[in-house]
Amino acid sequence: MDFTYQSLPGRVVFGPGKFSDVKTETERLGCKRVLVLSTPNQRFLAEQVADQLGELAAGIYDQAVMHVPVETVADVMAVVEQLDADCCVSVGGGSTVGLAKAIALKTALPILAIPTTYAGSEMTPVWGLTEDGIKTTGRDNRVLPKTVIYDPELTFGLPDFISGSSGMNAIAHCVEALYSETQNPVTSMMAEEGIRALGESLPVVVREPENLEARSSALFGAWLSGTVLGTVGMALHHKLCHTLGGSFNLPHAEVHTVVLPHATYFNKGHAPRAMAAIGRALKVSPDDAAGALFDLAKAIGSPLTLEQLGMKYEDLDRAAEIATQKPYYNPRAVDRAGIRQLLENAYQGIRPGKE
Ligand code: NAD
């Protein structure tokens, strides 16, 4: 064995009802003027947080939107200054914690995150900002939340179509962590367990949204997936999804869901240990790891083709070209013909191994 493992700092409080620990946890961070962040449709949760915080709550900003536009950041920064906030509590998904990260990037204010989806952003030091339609990302330890409260009861309201694709997105982080250039035994252990937890729980979660055991297991898997995403580098799958989402305006989590089985299949012969781990986690042979991911997406009713997501067939060539323009790490060398075939299979929704 030969590896480097860099763990990230951070405190995680996990369990049903832990939402009510928000005041104690905020006090623990030494904060006295808290700005609570949410999207417009989760304002009711932000209000519940503010109620719990009592005198520690300085105000609520409920205009978080997808991909952190710089205009929203300018807007919230005026509120941060006006309230003289010394901490942000984000309650919601990746979009809300993304806004908290943008504030922390400018001010180094501590973040307490209360995630309500499976995106995993709360465990990473990765920030993103969108200006004129172009998203820039970077890493900075100041944006990593100091404390994360995972309360599975807050995910009961997450609709089945978001639960399923958000969960598949989390599995994608685990899959690529297993064959990452910087993979190590610790993150690989977490990644395999993340796939197992999500693979077992997601079909139950979409059938029975208020099944606490399944919701807990899915959120636990999401935590593991966010941790590995924040710790090791990703590869082809994430690059492709970034290209498809950014250049062709396709929905983030659904693109991950559709592409993942095909990216996994592309790497199959070049990442045997990863295939074995995925196989163990999903209880199939390593040979059928990619097929099992396809079956899981199908079982949870997620879209299975790029066509369903609005991709145009005539754009596949350009997508293959953009995705192969700049070199990046992947266990199998990335070539244009291979990526074009991968995209064809994802466009058609062919079960890997059946083409
Ligand atoms: P999201 O935060 O955009 O939420 C989607 C919608 O679902 C929102 O309207 C939200 O209010 C609603 N919602 C969230 N939780 C809910 C719940 N429990 N019940 C009912 N409605 C709920 O979606 P997301 O998938 O969590 O985040 C996606 C964003 O996160 C993308 O911009 C992505 O790039 C980013 N992301 C960043 C990182 C990172 O490390 N920086 C990691 C993963 C994702």
Image (cartoon, rainbow, N blue to C red):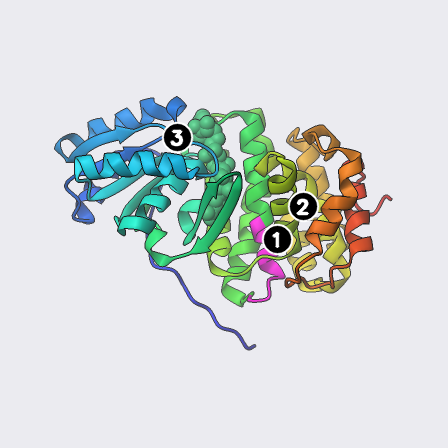
Which of the numbered marks, if any, corresponds to residue 260? 2
Which region of the structure is painted magenta? 173-182
- The reply to whether dot 2 and dot 3 touch (C-beta < 8 Å) is no
Density class for disc 3 (Cα within 10 Å; few <14, some 14-19, many ≥20) is many
- Give residue 18's position: percent from left, percent from top: 30, 37
Would residue 179 be counted in the magenta stretch? yes
Identity of the residue drawn at 30% across and 28% down: 46
Label 3 near ligand 1 (CB < 8 Å): yes
Identity of the residue drawn at 27% across and 25% down: 47
Task: Of the two numbered discs 3 and 1 on the same chain, state the one appearing first in sequence.
Answer: 3
Which of the numbered marks, if any, corresponds to residue 175? 1
- Furthest residue toward front: 132
Query: On the image, numbered disc 3 is attached to which residue?
Result: 154
Disc 2 residue type (three-letter): Leu
Q: Would residue 111 be found to the left or right of residue 330 on screen?
A: left
Q: Would residue 326 be found to the left or right of residue 317 on screen?
A: left
- Give residue 327's position: percent from left, percent from top: 66, 62
Q: Quadrant of residue 276?
A: bottom right
Task: Of the two numbered discs 2 and 3 on the same chain, state the one appearing first in sequence.
Answer: 3
Residue in front for this viewpoint, 213 or 301: 301
